Image (cartoon, grey):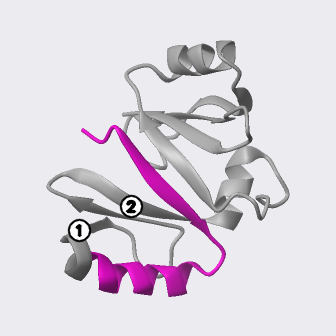
Amino acid sequence: MDALYPRLLVGDFAACFHFYDAVLPELCGAVRQKGDAGGPYANWDLDDQAVLSLLDRAGLAEVLGEVRAPASDATMLALRVADVDAALAHCLAHGGTVVAPATDRPHWGPNLRTAHLRDPEGRLIELQSY
């Protein structure tokens, strides 16, 4: 089960995809599980555990309801949880700020539900369950 992993938010998806697709297998044995150079998403795993994922910055902006994702959003932590709504409420009670409420996203994957928030210093976090 993927507990926590980095997601890079990129502007030149194809270039970043080709880079990580070439270096991750050699450097750490991570193998691409999903995606291609056309984007907007790709991920690499090692022994069924997420190592890294890429997401096109423009696609993220759409999800967050923004014209474009801020340039400061270069990374996002993705955290798999049992209950997105409860996890979001817990994070908000401890200083998080909601960016996009809990939403079902079947076009991303079967039974996928996400919420997006920022920690007290503005780092972007995705809570996900599937």
Seen in the image, is 37 located left or right of residue 96? left
Residue with the most extreme left position: 47
Amino acid type indicated by mark 2:
Leu
Residue occupied by mark 2: 52
Residue at horizontal 39%, vertical 78%? 20
Position of residue 93 relative to residue 115, above or below, is: above
Residue 6: say if magenta: yes
Residue at horizontal 42%, vertical 85%? 19
How far apart are the two marked residues, 1 and 2, measured between alpha carbons?
9 Å
User: Visible in this render: residue 64?
Assistant: yes
| Label 2, residues with CA under 10 Å away: few <14, some 14-19, many ≥20 | many
Place of residue 125 in the rendered image (x, y in percent of width and height, measured from the top left): 59, 40
Q: Secondary structure at mark 1?
A: loop
Residue at horizontal 54%, vertical 68%? 40
Place of residue 96 in the rendered image (x, y in percent of width and height, measured from the top left): 69, 26
Position of residue 30 relative to residue 104, above or below, is: below
Q: Quadrant of the N terminus?
A: top left
Residue occupied by mark 1: 30
Position of residue 17 relative to residue 90, above or below, is: below
Residue at horizontal 71%, vertical 21%? 95
Q: Quadrant of the C terminus?
A: top left
Seen in the image, is 82 located left or right of residue 14? left
> Is the C-beta separation of discs 1 and 2 under 8 Å?
yes
Tally of numbered tags:
2
User: Visible in this render: residue 109?
Assistant: no
Residue with the most extreme right position: 67
Is tag 1's residue or tag 2's residue first in the polypeptide sequence?
1
Q: Which mark is residue 60?
A: none
Q: Within the image, what quadrant is residue 97 found in?
A: top right
Amino acid type indicated by mark 1:
Ala
In this orientation, which residue lies closer to the viewer: 38 or 44? 44
Which stretch is magenta? 1-24
